[in-house]
Structures are given as C-alpha cells and as structure tokens.
Image: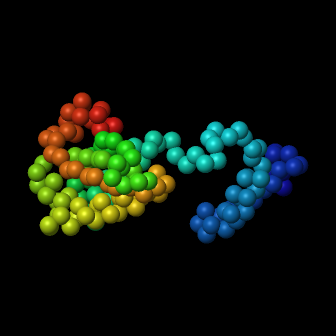
Amino acid sequence: MAVHELLGGNSEVVPVSSTSGENVETLIKVMTDLLPEGPKFYPDDHITDEDTNTRIAEAIREAALSGLKNELPHSVAVEVDEILPDPERNGVLAVHAIIYVERVGQKDIIVGHKGQRLGRIIHTSRQDIIKILGQNVFLDLRIKVLKNWQSDPKALNRLGF
C-alpha cells in the first residue's frame, strides 16, 4: 500500500467512514495508544479552575433560570456576598447571596406566585451548593433590582463579567 511507504513501516492505517461511523472507535483507540503521557497540569482531585464563589453563583443562577423560556437569561446575575459558619446551627455554613435583575417585573418572575418559585430556587441551588462545599448549608437569597446593570461597566466588573 502506498500509504505505508509514505508513513513508514510501523504506522497503522485505519480506514474510517464518516458517513456510517465505521472504525471511528478503532481510530480513537489507535491514536490514543500512540500518544505519549504528558505532565499533570492539575492535581487528581481538581475538577475545575473556577473558584468556589463562582461555582456557587452559577448553581444559583442555573436554578433561577430553570423552567423559564427566554424571559430572563441575560438579565440575571448572582453575587455570593459571604460564606460563614452559621452561629445558630453547628456544622452548617451560611451562604448569603444576591440575585440581581434589571427590572421590578423580573424580580416578580424570580419570586413567583406567593414565593413558590423562589422556594424552588433555594431548594435546588442549596442541594448543588452542599455538593460543592461538602457540608450542610443554610442559603440566604436576596433579590435586588439593579437597573441597567448590563450597561454599567462598574456593575459588570463587580458581578464578575
């Protein structure tokens, strides 16, 4: 075969079909086996390069946007204010965070009828935060209107954008 002559005698040729996907797994295996092991860039227990506050803020934002169509996505930002041991609950961390929206109507959407939506946001994000922090959490969430925060460079910087 002319390909073997071009690549050398020790090379492997794997015919692949992109249409049917034939031999794709074989190609991946052959290529992976040929790759040298490189240096570790991160410890084995390192799962992300995001800091804890950013991960918590994203968990809250994700819970806040869950179930909404296109009503709010770009108008919601979350800031973790502080994480402290809860003085009233032994072994519990108190996470204080703020959900920012641009208009009062958006705040009403986040809160929901009789606070039901906010309750779901707190419940869902609290479960995620417990996984992130590895211990029980009391989540204090506030919703604030920060008019036109998306157009304000200082607000964008403060909110991590």
Residue at image position (29%, 38%) is 159
Residue 43 located left or right of residue 97: right
Q: Whole-percent x and y of residue 100?
A: 22, 46
Q: Let me know if residue 147 appears in the view.
A: yes
Image coloring type: rainbow
User: Which quarter shows the C terminus?
Assistant: top left
Q: Give above or below for 124 relative to 104.
A: below
The residue most toward the right is 9
Residue at image position (39%, 50%) is 93
The residue most toward the left is 104
The quarter holding residue 90 reads: bottom left
Q: Whole-percent x and y of residue 108?
A: 13, 58
Closer to us: 67 or 93: 93
Q: Give above or below for 125 relative to 82.
A: below
Residue at image position (87%, 49%) is 10
Residue at image position (36%, 49%) is 86
Closer to us: 120 or 40: 120
Q: Whole-percent x and y of residue 129?
A: 41, 55
